[in-house]
Image (cartoon, helix red, strand yellow):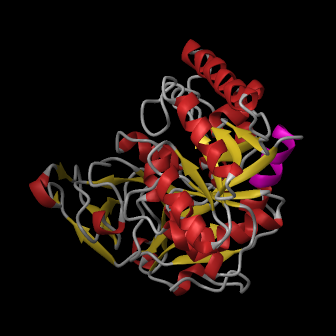
Amino acid sequence: MNADAGAPVDPRAAERSAVVDLAAIRHNVRILRSRVAPAALMAVVKADAYGHGMLPVATAALEAGADWLGVAHVSEALVLRRAGIDAPLLAWLHTPATDFAAAVDADVDLGVSGWELEPIAAAAEAAGRPARVHLKIDTGLGRNGCTAEQWPVLVRAALDHEAAGRVRFVGVFSHLAVADEPVRPETDAQVAAFRAAVAVAEDAGARLEVRHLANSPAILTRPETHFDLVRAGVSIYGLSPLAGITAAELGLTPAMTLRAAIANIKHVPAGQGISYGLRYRTEAASTLALVPVGYADGVPRIAADAPVTIDGQRHTVAGRIAMDQFVVDLVDPVPTDPDALLGTDAVLFGDPATGAPAVEEWAEAAQTINYEVVTRIGTRVPRVYRDSGTAR
């Protein structure tokens, strides 16, 4: 169970935990809002807030001035509404099984790429109240979104439903494909396509409240994409969406620290094999620390040689990461009193300003991105909330 976000908690009370600093969340939201003003800011809290915990993060983001919340699925939106959150809220990824009636009843704005418009309108008619819809244009990402060829037809259908009182055509949105590579020309083409789609809608009579295109990298590098509203995802968690640029350089503070209490200390001779496959052997007599998290907790199995901080000293994973645990060879430097480390914290990643390894180091070791590393941390790792009040 998650700890009460308002109560101070000693993270060491748990054998393992993902410690989330809500002050960092608020700090990041304020930084991002200052970058995009006068545009409004949507805090994207899908996927359990990228693994950080949806309800505490949503609350902190709204406290810091976020104007909207965004999720992928209606089921996520309904959790927020049942928790009493009444801020503007958009859900955009649907299937024929999506409960549009519940979404309309809960005043959840709905993204529409095409087929969804008719069942949404039917649900709204049955409810006796209009559904708020944002039409999505595919400007080049090639996932969801209406094609340019079908766009005028979708716009006309939405306006017809609006005239009949079944929907309120609230906005137009799209998603960028390569904004994390700021110099690529495809983003310019997507911006132009987006502007053209908005013009088609407005020329047809749409009275739009919001136009939104920018994701985290575009928020930070492409002010021409900000329009009326931006969607801030990974950046509100204090992680950089830009290769070669750290969170600190962007003024952001990483919110999550992943740590576990050392479960065993063992002295071994030279040549000791470690973990499955015996791909690692000690070069000399050494001491091994056992860290009780593994790939069942979302720690990437592939991340051999990823960094771990123990007692303020950096070490690396030794051998394969197993389902529940991995091993650290306590060399370079050798601890003065390794036996005293039993029960102390091994920190996998956190805010480098505190001496923790950066999540990007784990992403590099796992051949993936920082988004995936934090999002995949599983439910067996309790989320523990703190409020440092000292985030940069």
- Name which residue lies at 71% across and 30% down: 204
- Rendered position, 244 above or below 236: above
Horizontal arrangement in the rendering, residue 143 relative to residue 329 (left or right): right
Q: Quadrant of residue 229?
A: top right
Residue 260, percent across and down?
45, 73
Q: Please state which of residues 347 and 83 is positioned toward the viewer in this rendering.
A: 83
Residue 353 shows up from this direction: no
Q: Please state which of residues 218 and 193 is positioned toward the viewer in this rendering.
A: 193
Residue 75, percent across and down?
49, 70
- Rendered position, 75 above or below 280: below
Number of disc labels: 0
Residue 339, percent across and down?
39, 77
Q: Quadrant of residue 202?
A: top right
- Rendered position, 336 above or below 372: below
Task: State the residue lying farthest toward the top.
Answer: 185
Whether the magenta-drawn stretch holds residue 155 is answered as no
Q: Please state which of residues 200 and 373 is positioned toward the viewer in this rendering.
A: 200
Horizontal arrangement in the rendering, residue 100 relative to residue 174 (left or right): left
Q: Please state which of residues 70 and 104 is positioned toward the viewer in this rendering.
A: 104
- Predominant SS along the magenta part: helix
Residue 279 shows up from this direction: yes
Residue 352, percent across and down?
62, 50
- Name which residue lies at 68% across and 80% down: 5
- Name which residue lies at 49% across and 37% down: 145
Horizontal arrangement in the rendering, residue 239 relative to residue 335 (left or right): right
- Name which residue lies at 43% across and 75% down: 381
Task: State the residue lying farthest toward the right.
Answer: 38
Task: State the residue lying farthest toward the front.
Answer: 164
Q: Which stretch did the figure color magenta?
A: 28-37
